[in-house]
Image: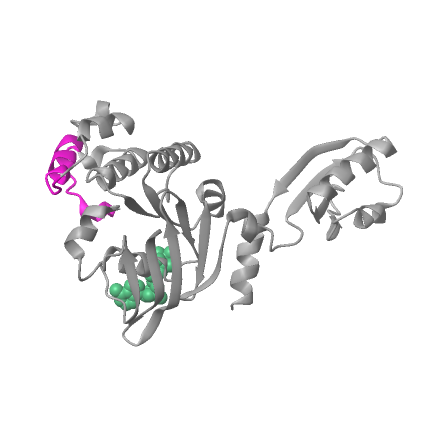
């Protein structure tokens, strides 16, 4: 049985539709991504799931409960990430964990959580003095302190450096592995691709795709990009365009760098072709832009 069921919800602010008929289900134990451009309606959608907003139409169920009518029970099942402004800057990490665990009838042991999240050396530190990554780890700990079955994390890694972002991803995986369902709102394609079992793409208040990351990425042609600078000019540059899966070939007039858009098969064929011609590819790069491309294709189609 799905743990979250969202059915045709609509929400307007002063007559302007922010969410327009969105529906999806989240299975227990998955990391479910909600991806979309700014102002797409992602936060409004998860706020309806959390019971923080009442949809104008449609229904939401969390473990079969109505987040508004059964607010009390749903609050126990569902851990919500605080926003930065939700914590007093002078509160220490220990005080915040103690305070929030007191809100729940069966809280997790906050000391164990602090250890798991690498906060044990910062218990006496004030919130305002924590780094961005430490604040995010505290927010994850506070979202988990009530022993929820589902946790909603909204833009958790925005503003973090690449290492702190990777560390946070690892923590999110650990949360999922401990049996908690994760709903992750994100702008980052890479994050969604790396972490999510399924992704709902929302644009202008509507659900425009619901699939696995691979399923969404597979909607876009030309998702592998190979670029290189050949050690000598190719005898027939058009041969690249005839390789299997090749979508386009372009050459930078300044340094002769060649870029081929295609598939994984194209990348293999480019390398074989160059080897056969005795040409070395310097500064060879192979990029998988699939999810980015698919996202842009989807949201452009919708424009
Ligand atoms: N309290 C509010 N009052 C009026 N309009 C609002 C309110 N909250 C959101 N909106 C509008 O509703 C639309 C959807 O906003 P929402 O925050 O749900 O989108 P989002 O996808 O989460 O965006 P972002 O990625 O920028 O956070 C936007 O046009 C936004 O300006």
Residue lying farthest bottom?
A: 15
> Which range is magenta?
82-105
Residue 181 falls left or right of residue 98 = right
Left-right relation of 124 to 279: left
Who's the residue at 85% across and 46% down the image?
Answer: 239
Name the residue located 42 percent from the left edge and 31 percent from the top edge.
163
| Side of 3 where 270 appears, left or right | right
Q: How is the rendered protein coloured? A: one colour
Residue 118 lies in the magenta stretch: no
Q: Residue furthest top?
A: 121
The percent coordinates of residue 17 (x first, y second) are: 35, 72
The answer to whether any part of residue 91 appears in the image is no
Which residue sits at x=15%, y=27%? 124
- Image x and y of residue 116, in percent: 28, 27
- Residue 166: quarter of image: top left
Q: Is residue 241 visible?
A: yes
Residue nearest the observer in this picture, 59 or 297? 59
When the figure is inspected, residue 211 is found, relative to residue 165, above or below; the finding is: below
* Residue sitting at the far right: 235
Residue 116 or residue 104, whichever sits in front = 104
């Amino acid at each position: 049985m799905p743990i979250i069921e969202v059915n045709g919800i609509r929400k307007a602010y002063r007559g302007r539709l922010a969410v327009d008929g969105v529906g999806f289900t989240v299975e227990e134990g998955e990391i479910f991504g909600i991806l979309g451009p700014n102002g797409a309606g992602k936060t409004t959608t998860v706020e309806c799931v959390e019971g923080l907003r009442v949809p104008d139409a449609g229904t939401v169920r969390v473990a079969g409960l109505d987040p508004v009518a059964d607010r009390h029970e749903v609050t126990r099942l569902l851990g919500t990430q605080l926003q930065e402004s939700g914590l007093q800057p002078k509160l220490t990490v220990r005080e915040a964990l103690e305070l929030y665990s007191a809100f729940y009838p069966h809280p997790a042991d906050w000391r164990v959580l602090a250890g798991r999240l690498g906060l044990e050396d910062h218990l006496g530190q004030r919130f305002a003095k924590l780094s961005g990554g430490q604040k995010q780890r505290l927010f994850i700990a506070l979202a988990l302190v009530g022993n929820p079955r589902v946790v909603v994390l909204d833009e958790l890694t925005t503003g973090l450096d690449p290492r702190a972002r990777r560390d946070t991803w690892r923590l999110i995986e650990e949360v999922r592995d401990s049996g908690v369902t994760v709903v992750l709102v994100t702008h980052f394609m890479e994050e969604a691709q790396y972490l999510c079992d399924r992704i709902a793409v929302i644009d202008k208040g509507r659900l425009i795709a619901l699939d696995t990351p691979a399923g969404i990425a597979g909607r876009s042609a030309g998702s592998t990009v190979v670029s290189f600078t050949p050690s000598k000019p190719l005898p027939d540059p058009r041969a690249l365009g005839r390789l299997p899966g090749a979508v386009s070939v372009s050459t930078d007039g300044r340094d002769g760098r060649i870029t081929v858009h295609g598939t994984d098969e194209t990348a293999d064929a480019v390398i074989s072709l160059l080897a056969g011609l005795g040409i070395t590819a310097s500064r060879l790069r192979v990029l998988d832009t699939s999810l980015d491309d698919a996202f842009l294709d989807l949201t452009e189609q919708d424009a």
